[in-house]
């Protein structure tokens, strides 16, 4: 009975945490390092990189979360019309659902991996998506342009590099840039989702090309200069623990040269576990 009770309690605790970290719920914005600021919701990352010549937003969170992101940008003292680019990690509702509304509010150009451009425009995912059939459609965005691996987006003093990290989606993209505090510059990486997640009927073992994409994305992310890693799902690299520690440690709490590797390890473990379970 005790065992059952504790199982019940731990299940309950998990649910409570999940509710605390609702994908669309409000979240106070905060600075991660230098010009890099968290403007996302309680459960989904959105990052504003600022410069005197204009700003770059990475991801829009959910359709409901767009309001949170817009309010957070204003709370930090920045103007929505100064956001010139919205970069997309991948075209699923939890990260891209808010992009259409944020594009309208800012007038920004939306940039996504070439293979995800169509989905960003229509809000409808293609059949090749492992999660096809279990995904929610979302509002398609205006002014979407494709980027290729290694392309550098420049805006004033900002330079953000696109890194193609497909597998979770065909056009998945991670983004890197430098942010500085005083004279100390850090390499910041927004790491796209690299999780092997699918609709119930999908088997990764039937799609070796997708498995190969995920593995090559792991290698790409591990190979990046990475001092500050921000995952599309913030808890994947303990953003909330870091935020708590930053009360005492300042921005050093976010600096972790193993951050990208930690995110990859989680993705790799999930993929390998999944492939084993499909083989049974
Ligand atoms: Zn996704």
Image: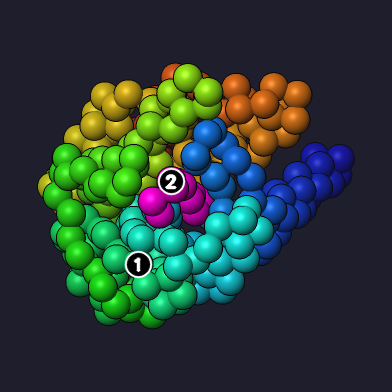
Image spot of residue 205 (x, y percent)? 21, 47
Helix or strand or loop: what does disc 2 sit on? Answer: loop
Distance (Cα) linking label 2 and label 1: 15 Å
Q: Residue at x 38, y 32 (%)?
A: 178
Q: Is residue 104 visible?
A: yes
Identify whether 171 is placed above or below 218. Answer: below
Q: Which residues are magenta?
A: 45-54
Q: Residue at x 70, y 59 (%)?
A: 19
Q: Is mark 2 within 8 Å of ligand 1?
A: no
Q: Quadrant of the C terminus?
A: top left
Q: Residue at x 17, y 40 (%)?
A: 150
Image spot of residue 13 (x, y percent)? 76, 48
Name the one closer to the observer, 140 or 129: 140
Q: Is residue 4 visible?
A: no
Q: Main secondary structure of the magenta part?
A: loop
Q: Earlier in the sequence, mark 2 or mark 1?
A: 2
Image spot of residue 125 (x, y percent)? 27, 71
Q: Residue at x 75, y 24 (%)?
A: 248
Label 2 belongs to which residue? 51
The picture quadrant where one finds residue 57 is: bottom left
Determine crowd level at label 2: few under 14, some 14-19, many 20+ residues with C-alpha closer than 10 A.
some
Label 1 belongs to which residue? 108
Helix or strand or loop: what does disc 1 sit on? Answer: loop
Name the one closer to the observer, 274 or 83: 83
Q: Relative to residue 30, is residue 37 drawn left or right?
A: left
């Amino acid at each position: 009975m005790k065992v059952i009770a504790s199982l019940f309690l731990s299940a309950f605790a998990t649910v409570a945490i999940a509710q605390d970290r609702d994908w669309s719920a409000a979240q106070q914005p905060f600075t991660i390092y230098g010009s890099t600021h968290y403007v996302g919701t309680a459960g989904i990352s959105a990052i504003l990189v600022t410069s005197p010549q204009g700003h770059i937003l990475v991801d829009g969170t959910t359709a409901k979360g767009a309001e949170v992101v817009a309010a957070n940008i204003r709370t930090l003292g920045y103007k929505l019309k100064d956001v010139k680019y919205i970069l997309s990690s991948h075209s699923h509702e939890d990260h891209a659902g808010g992009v259409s509304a944020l594009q309208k509010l800012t007038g920004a150009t939306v940039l996504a991996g070439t293979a995800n451009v169509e989905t960003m425009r229509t809000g409808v995912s293609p059949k090749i998506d492992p999660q096809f059939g279990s995904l929610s459609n979302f509002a398609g965005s205006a002014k979407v342009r494709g980027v290729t691996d290694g392309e550098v987006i420049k805006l004033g003093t900002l330079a953000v590099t696109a890194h193609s990290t497909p597998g979770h989606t065909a056009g998945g993209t991670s983004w890197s840039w430098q942010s500085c505090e005083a004279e100390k510059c850090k390499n910041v990486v927004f790491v796209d989702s690299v999780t092997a997640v699918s609709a119930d009927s999908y088997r990764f073992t039937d799609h070796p090309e997708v498995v190969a994409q995920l593995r090559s994305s792991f290698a790409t992310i591990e190979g990046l200069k990475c001092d500050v890693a921000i995952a599309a799902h913030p808890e994947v690299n303990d953003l909330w623990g870091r935020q708590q520690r930053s009360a005492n440690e300042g921005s050093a709490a976010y600096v972790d040269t193993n951050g990208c590797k930690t995110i990859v390890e989680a993705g790799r473990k999930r993929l390998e576990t999944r492939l084993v379970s499909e083989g049974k």
